[in-house]
Image (cartoon, rainbow, N blue to C red):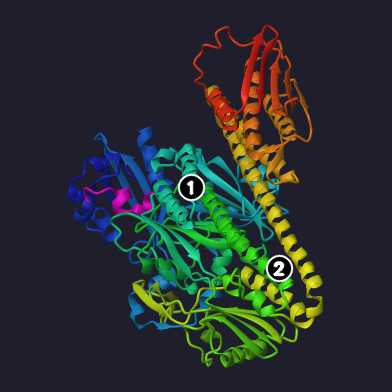
Amino acid sequence: MTDSAFLDTLSFDELNALDFGVVQVDRHGTILFYNHALSRLSGRAPDEVIGRNLFQDVAPATRVPAFYGRFREFVRRKASTQTFSLIRGLNPAPVRATVELLSSRDPDRYWILVHPQERLEPRLLSEPALAVGRRVRAEPVDPSICEREPIHIPGSIQPYAALLALDRDSMMVTACSANVDDVLGQGADTVLGQAIAELLPPDLVELIRSKQLAAATPARTRVSLGAGGDPFLASVHQHGGRIIVELERLAWAPEDFSAIDPLVAEDALARLRSPTSVQALAQEAVEIIRDLTGFERVLVYRFDPNWNGEAIAESRTETWDHSLAGLHFPASDIPSQARALYTRSLSRYLVDRDYVPVPLLAHPDAEQDPVDLTFAQSRSLSPVHLEYQRNLGVNGSMSASILVEGRLWGLVIGHHRKPHYVPPETRSAVAVIVNALAAQVSESERSALWQSQQEHLRVETQLLQQMAAADDLVSAISSEEVGLLDLFGSSGAALIVNGTVTNFGVTPPAPRILDLLERVRNRDTASLTFATDHLTGVFPDLTIEAADASGCLVAFANAAKTIALVWFKPEVISTVTWGGDPRKPVMSEPGVNAVLPRRSFERWVEERRRYSEPWPAWQVGIAGSLAAAMDGVVVRQSRKVEELVGLLHDKERLLVQKEILTREIDHRVKNSLQIVSSFLQMQARTVSDPEARDAFTEAYGRVMSVARVHNSLYQSEDVEEVDVGQTVESLCTDLAELAGDGSRLEVEAQPGIMVPYKTGVALALIATELVTNAFKYAQSEDDIGTVRVGIGIEAQGRVCLSVSDSGPGLPPDWKTRPKRGLGMRLINAMLTQIEATLDVESNSDGAHFRVCA
């Protein structure tokens, strides 16, 4: 242990003569002195670093709780000394060192001493990193090498956390990371084979023993470990027959790392509710997430059907000139096994690209199967991926999966040119925001798809009606009112019956169409449909003009494939701007057992020729059903009316499905509102201020009132109306449970009162406000009282809602009081919206409200 008083007496020359690193900083980390030993260790000259901030500018990888967090707490406690170990990837090889924090005798001065203990073997570094200086000779190799890399079992973790792997039955440690001594105060040789109850606090052990642990959603809790009670985040999940415990050191003071307030996340979610297009949603999301996380660049990266990626939105600092917005990236940049991992484990953070991996050590008597780290947040990353980031000029990074309908739609990606730490609180907020973005994208795409599908179903239904009524099939499908060309945005179409071609619009010549049809028949003898947006890509020797047909959709009407409908789309000449040449995704290094990702990300423009607009799968389905309907028309003209009537019934079923989907949308809205109300309830439990807690409770009631309307709408036979009696009765049950067991609520609701959705929402919100106020103001601890709610239809046919209580009544001056409360303003707004009246009576028997609409 070094004496700070001794250091304070040394001259600069004497400090420079020491054989260990010495740096002096102020309380903010600004470097005041930097000795020669540390300069040799770090490769940084003193005049380059003095006057700069150690943790922000000179060694940003140390701006983590394990170093900067300790330093800040050391300064706050005015401690005299603190010692801990550190591994840094310094030149020319990584170094294990002991770090001492000492207080100087001079005010606001602190010594940081770095005692190198050993240089680690270079093999701990990724092989691509060792090959950086020799990449000029690299040659392209098979990209499938990357796809075979076992990235879920890297055998190491990132150094910001420690990891324990337990046998699920015995609860013994069968594997652990080599850095457990920094967390538990015991080395790996001691920890391996121990029961977990001997190592961790009882509350955490109880959580682990519950074994009710999901892989994708680990259980998390804060714990204090070590003699100093250092704060850690424990994340526990179960996977591959093991229980995985990750222990991440936290900051003593979250504000040291700008941890966000929950209200900030709520505001961010509110901002995502405004945009309507996917592009606008993505741009809003990247602005929000960059504000929260501090990354220098945040992207939304969307996959196409072939798994190529496009940066559809970007927010970046002004100092980063290189924009990725609008660039496309080949599928090989994110191989299939990486995409599979992103689908299962939804987020990944990298503090420092040049970290030294912490190996996992196994107990000699335990099974030697590698520890599957699929769901481990601290999982070490692929060396190829780290080299890819190096080539891109990125150090710290994040990736968060955007899942739409269970499919990997895209990623939110964060980039930083220096190491960058993001606190767990912020990471959790990002996960919530990305989930909200995914939900909004899903709803936006579903809505656009629904509208397009309904228009095409309308055209198809009308075509079927024309076919059912017409004696001639050609005239039926080429009517001026609606015809084949009104489907799918096509420029041409053709009907082929037993070798006879009837053209509509711009098409290839009839012999070319018959040649195409023969090729399609031979290509897949089983399928009755075929679609492509790149005809010459499927049939290279096909001679068809691009302007006539670069894409086509074929639907056969019968198994013999003698009757067919064909739609054509012309060439759409476009350019795709790639981030580098997509034909050179992976390189190999001669003489080194390493695979290197491509180095260039300069804009590379590809002109796409002989491609048309694509054919979505649902369009292929509509084409197939329309073609199937023709078989009877062509073969059995005498019975066409009867057969087409049956087909029209099928189309009526599709319209019924439309109503079912509308109900499903209402069901999802109800579920979403219930989720929001649950969040409000959870937030209310964490708020100590009574007024704030009441505000959350009131908000919960209002959200639930709308949710109950959607629930009634979902259950109703008519998707436009709701049973307001059932809605109010269910709503009152919710409010009574929220108020507590001591409340007495009597509800008399006439069943079967169907009102428009708008009226149902308004009456539900009014009932919520009146019943909530009755619980709040008309009852006391001594006199619980009774709240009576009634809803029915009066003689004039109006729907009337009544709410009465047995309390002391309204204040004498209630009529003259300014009605400024949010509840009263809401009631007045709802009354105006549905043109309803409100009558109020108040006496010693209580307050009585009557709303008629």
Q: CA distance from mark 2 to mark 1?
A: 44 Å
Q: Is residue 215 magenta?
A: no
> Is residue 263 depicted above or below 492 in this figure?
above
Count of number-bearing discs: 2
Q: Which residue is mark 1?
A: 272
Q: Which residue is mark 2?
A: 465
Query: Extreme front residue here?
Result: 471
| 10 Å crowding of disc 1: few (<14), some (14-19), many (20+) | many
Q: Is residue 404 visible?
A: no
> Is residue 769 depicted above or below 482 in this figure?
above
Stretch of the chain drawn in magenta: 50-63
Q: Is residue 60 magenta?
A: yes
Q: Position of residue 593 (x, y in %)?
A: 46, 79
Q: Position of residue 217 (x, y in %)?
A: 62, 51
Task: Name the kind of residue labelled 1 in the image.
Answer: Leu
> Is residue 70 depicted above or below 358 in this figure?
above
Which element carries disc 2, helix, strand or loop?
Answer: helix
In the image, which disc is placed on residue 388?
none
Residue 70 lies in quadrant: top left
Of tags 2 and 1, the one toward the viewer is 2
Which element carries disc 1, helix, strand or loop?
Answer: loop
